[in-house]
């Protein structure tokens, strides 16, 4: 492509690349598709669009040609999104070549076959994306986890095939950066990543990938929880991880450390309460006291204490049962069913978070009482 044709579109940095012999090709926008494997976050699009409109492209896009003749993006999704904004708002500079609705875009066309590496087509494409995205903006936690995971895949495959080094990318002057494959995969990946990330941060990701439920990993990918907080959650039992993730919270709100701390305190309190109840039930003196109390409580038709069969209920619940004069376990269960349904509806309706868990306590107490009554009926 002639130098003068693209000179109006590119900044001095990009023009310098062409002067160095790097071929820049103009490709119609309709022939370029975004890469589904490149899931990095994009932001500040309006600001970038204005910058492109005023100063041109800092760098051309990098693409590769598919079998059908169209092109797929390797790097430059943020730039392409900004260009799409200019097209949609009809703000492209008058000097921009091509149709106003389908303008020509400066691109560097890569051939994936030039990467002579023993990688599958899928990994080779990920490698090309990683290699050409070394100078990306500040990444989010989801970007960091995704980049680290992909580099681990690539490095593991290269090691398996006996490689001792590989080209991780190029520096700002276009010189290749060679990376040794000796040492721990985590440390090699750290050196290969485009942004400096501590090995401690990567260690947390390893724990998260090993112990976290799929829903937790998805939450990190959606930037709904940070790596640090997610790693703390991953140490919980699987059912607790899911319970915390499913807790109602305002839309688009991230899971913060204070919410996790509150949840852990709640679980600790619940466990301590359970342990105290077990100790109390095993105490012979306490059993004698329970028998004395039963003599003063209302008796059912079969002579059994109806209230004594509900040790998990709060005192207020016991008093209410006495007041109603309930005489059968079945009647008690019917009332509990209604109360449990009301509790569940209240939890959903009020969108309570874990900073206000009183209703959760009541809800659990009633469920425990219901289960106890069910066991009582099964024994009869």
Image: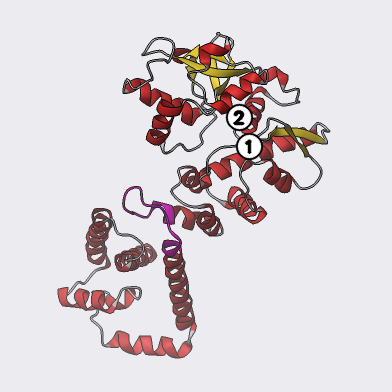
Residue 120 is labelled as none
In the picture, the quarter occupied by the N terminus is top right
Q: Residue at x 27, y 67 (%)?
A: 329
Does 333 sit left or right of 99 as displayed? Answer: left
Query: Residue 11: x and y, percent?
Result: 52, 26
Query: Residue 61: x and y, percent?
Result: 54, 23
Q: On screen, 208 above or below 97?
A: below
Q: On screen, 6 above or below 141?
A: above
Whether the magenta-drawn stretch holds residue 37 is answered as no
Q: Is residue 142 visible?
A: yes
Camera-side mark, 2 or 1: 2
The image quadrant of residue 365 is bottom left
Q: Residue at x 35, y 76 (%)?
A: 311
Count the numbered circles shown: 2
Q: Which residue is mark 1?
A: 150
In the picture, the quarter occupied by the C terminus is bottom left
> What's the magenta region?
244-260
Does 378 sit left or right of 125 as displayed? Answer: left
Q: On screen, 292 above or below 218?
A: below
Query: Residue 320: x and y, percent?
Result: 20, 75
Of helix, strand and loop, which one carries label 2?
helix
Q: Which residue is mark 2?
A: 129
Check disc 2: other Cα within 10 Å, few if <14, some if 14-19, many if 20+: many
The residue nearer to you, when weighing 256 against 266, is 256
Q: On screen, 51 above or below 378?
A: above
Give the colouring mode of the picture.
Answer: secondary structure
């Amino acid at each position: 492509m002639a130098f003068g044709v693209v000179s109006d579109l590119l900044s001095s940095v990009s023009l310098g690349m062409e002067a160095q012999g790097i071929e820049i090709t103009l490709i119609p926008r309709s022939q370029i598709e975004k890469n589904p494997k490149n899931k990095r976050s994009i932001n500040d699009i309006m600001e970038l669009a204005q910058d492109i409109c005023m100063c041109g492209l800092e760098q051309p896009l990098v693409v590769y040609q598919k079998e059908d003749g169209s092109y797929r993006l390797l790097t430059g999704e943020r730039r392409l999104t900004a260009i799409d904004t200019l097209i949609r708002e009809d703000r492209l500079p008058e000097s921009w070549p091509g149709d106003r609705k389908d303008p020509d875009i400066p691109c560097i066309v890569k051939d994936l076959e030039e990467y002579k590496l023993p990688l599958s087509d899928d990994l080779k494409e990920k490698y090309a994306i990683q290699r050409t995205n070394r100078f990306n903006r500040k990444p989010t936690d989801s970007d960091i986890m995704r980049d680290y995971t992909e580099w681990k895949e690539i490095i593991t495959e290269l090691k398996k095939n006996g490689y001792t080094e590989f080209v991780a990318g190029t520096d700002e002057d276009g010189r290749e950066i060679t990376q040794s494959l000796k040492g721990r995969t985590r440390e090699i990946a750290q050196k290969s990543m485009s942004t400096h990330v501590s090995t401690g941060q990567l260690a947390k990701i390893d724990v998260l990938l090993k112990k976290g439920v799929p829903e937790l990993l998805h939450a990190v990918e959606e930037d709904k929880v940070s790596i640090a907080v997610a790693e703390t959650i991953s140490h919980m039992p699987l059912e607790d991880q899911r319970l915390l993730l499913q807790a109602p919270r305002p839309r688009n709100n991230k899971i913060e450390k204070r919410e996790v701390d509150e949840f852990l305190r709640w679980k600790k309190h619940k466990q301590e309460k359970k342990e105290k109840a077990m100790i109390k039930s095993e105490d012979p003196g306490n059993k004698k006291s329970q028998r004395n109390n039963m003599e003063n409580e209302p008796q059912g038709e079969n002579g059994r204490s109806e209230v004594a069969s509900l040790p998990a209920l709060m005192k207020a619940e016991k008093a209410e049962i006495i007041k109603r004069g309930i005489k059968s376990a079945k009647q008690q269960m019917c009332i509990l069913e209604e109360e449990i349904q009301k509790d569940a509806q209240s939890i959903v309706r009020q969108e309570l978070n874990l900073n206000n868990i009183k209703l959760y306590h009541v809800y659990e107490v009633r469920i425990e009482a219901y289960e106890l009554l069910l066991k009582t009926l099964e024994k009869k």
